[in-house]
Image (cartoon, rainbow, N blue to C red):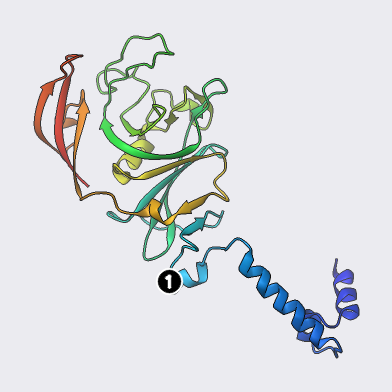
Amino acid sequence: MKTNWFTTAAVCCALSVGTAFGLPCQGAQSAATTKHQSAKSKKTDAPANKDAQSENGGDPFTNNHYVLTGTLPMNGFHKGAPTVVVVDKGSHFTYVLQLQNNKIVRVYTASNDIGNADKPTPPGRYTVVRKQMYPKWIPPKTIKHAPVAPYNQTHKNPLGVAAIYLNKFDIDLHGTNEPNLIRKSTSHGCVRHSNGDILKLYGMINRGDVVYIVNKFRGKVLDRADFSKHGSKTKHVAQTDVTPSAEPSVTTDKHEHHKHTGELIYYYTIDT
């Protein structure tokens, strides 16, 4: 490879590489044309991330887009900063990203367990609609099983200690009662995490946050709008079968029985 490089420089002295080493060149006009064409090509190609500009306090987005790479910087979680979650099916990792000081950073990484071959986790863009500590497991129609009480009452509950519900396909991010299955593909479509990780995610993710489920992290394009802040800092959420004392940051406003199922529903305020 080294010999070929010097051969190319000697034969094509008009190239910028040859000029950089002070080689005499009679093709200055050709080199200028090549440089002009290269610059023109850069304008028409898909834009890259403005990492250098971002480091100087600029805008990390190009045409309102940001392409994920394998070299995202890491930083601690900033409460209140715009947050996006990316579930990478290929690597079995769930990533929490934030926009901090005009820079996209990775603040948390958790291993996950995704859908099996018969019930694969559908990729796509989702939003968080609600969160719940110690949720009761109500099996989908495809699973013939009686409902299971919350995990703090029985460890037979496959949702574990918490669940983060998404807006479609009945997909949730939740804990587990089988931690040995993490980093595998054994669920019925939901994204399982260890109970320790789901508690971390629970504290970082809020209603309205965007969640991407992707086949591959690298190359995924995020939109500027994904990092927009949703609603006020105080959100009123209706949760089913939640013991108010299970989450100290929750203030109970009222409770009532569901008119159809008879389940006790608590309405409370979550300060995020």
- On the rendered image, what quadrant is the N terminus found in? bottom right
* Residue 101 x/y as whole percent: 36, 65
Q: In this view, does 49 lie above or below 8?
A: above
In the rendered view, would you say 15 is above or below 49? Answer: below
- Point 53% across, 63% down: residue: 49
Task: Give the camera-side residue of 37 and 138.
Answer: 37
Q: Between residue 33 and residue 172, name the one nearer to us.
A: 33
Q: Report which quarter residue 14 is drawn in.
A: bottom right
187 relative to 4 in the view: left or right:
left
Q: Mark 1, residues whose alpha carbon is within 10 Å: few (<14), some, or many (≥20)? A: some
Q: Name the residue under label 1.
A: 58
Q: Which residue lies furthest to the left in this view?
A: 254
Instruction: Pinpoint residue 33: horizontal percent, then vertical percent.
Output: 76, 80
The location of residue 72, given as percent across then percent down, is 50, 57
Q: In this view, does 262 lie to the left or right of 161?
A: left
Quadrant in the rendering for residue 172: top left
Q: Is residue 198 left or right of residue 252?
A: right
Q: Residue at x 8, y 30 (%)?
A: 254
- From this view, report whether residue 78 is shown above or below residue 125: below
Instruction: Give x and y (percent) for residue 79.
Output: 28, 54
Q: Identity of the amino acid at label 1?
A: Gly
**Label 1 residue SS:** loop
